[in-house]
Image (cartoon, rainbow, N blue to C red):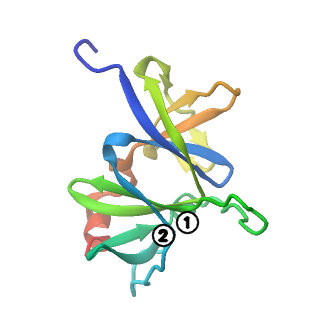
Amino acid sequence: MAGEDSQFQLVTFQLGEEVYGVNIMDVKEIVKIQEVRPIPNAPHYVEGIINLRSEIIPIIDLHKRFRIKSIENEGYVDFDGGFIILNIEGNKIGIIIDRIARVVHVSMADVKDPPQMLSGIGTEYIHGVIRSENGGYLIMLDIRKLFNPKELQKIIP
């Protein structure tokens, strides 16, 4: 893929037992947990909305979307959950995370195709898998495939 930048950055976060990453260019900001107001008749994975500096942002629970068990945060002194505010097709959407990890530099050569089924998430949501230094792996999400256009119409205020 000549001409393409082979280096990029991922914002990584923990969701359940796994570590995921999204392209830093798709991240607007990271905010601490705050009150989420429910939306009547919303899809099961939509937690509700928040008011962030006079902007209404829908909050998605990827635990529900991917059927992942949340980290039990009782007893966690360093519980670091919050929301990552993403910019998807010009719309801001927040996703709930268990713990923010860090920003990592990645080379396109390190991104491998995902196995058919990974931790219960369908491969349609995964851009690739990157091996980490500790022998584990980082799952790179494709945020544009997390929601189809019809779903976005239902959740964007």
Q: In what element is the residue under mark 1?
A: helix
**Vertical comparison of 38 with 9: above or below:** below
Q: At which x and y percent is residue 95?
A: 45, 61
Q: At which x and y percent is residue 34?
A: 48, 75
Q: At which x and y percent is residue 155?
A: 32, 72
Quadrant assignment for the N terminus: top left
> Residue beneath label 2, please?
45
Q: Name the residue nearer the viewer: 151 or 18.
A: 18
- Determine which quarter of the picture holds residue 99: bottom right
Q: Please tell me which residue is depicted at 29% across the width and 54% down the height of the picture.
A: 87
Q: How would you rate the neighbour count of disc 1 (Cα within 10 Å): few for under 14, some for 14-19, many for 20 or more? A: some
Q: How would you rate the neighbour count of disc 2 (Cα within 10 Å): few for under 14, some for 14-19, many for 20 or more? A: some
Q: Please tell me which residue is depicted at 38% across the width and 77% down the height of the picture.
A: 49
Left or right: 92 in relation to 112: left
> Residue beneath label 1, please?
64
- Circles 1 and 2, Cβ within 8 Å, touching? The answer is yes
- Residue furthest bottom as drawn: 40
Quadrant assignment for the C terminus: bottom left
**Mark 1–mark 2 distance (CA, rounded to whole Å):** 5 Å
**Mark 2 or mark 1, which is nearer the start of the sequence?**
2
Q: Please tell me which residue is depicted at 60% across the width and 44% down the height of the picture.
A: 19
Task: Check disc 1 and give the amino acid type.
Answer: Lys
Left or right: 97 in relation to 105: right
Q: Name the residue nearer the viewer: 15 or 50.
A: 50
Q: At which x and y percent is residue 6?
A: 35, 19
Q: In what element is the residue under mark 2?
A: loop
Task: Check disc 2 and give the amino acid type.
Answer: Tyr
Q: Name the residue nearer the viewer: 114 or 11.
A: 11
Q: Please tell me which residue is depicted at 29% across the width and 64% down the height of the picture.
A: 152
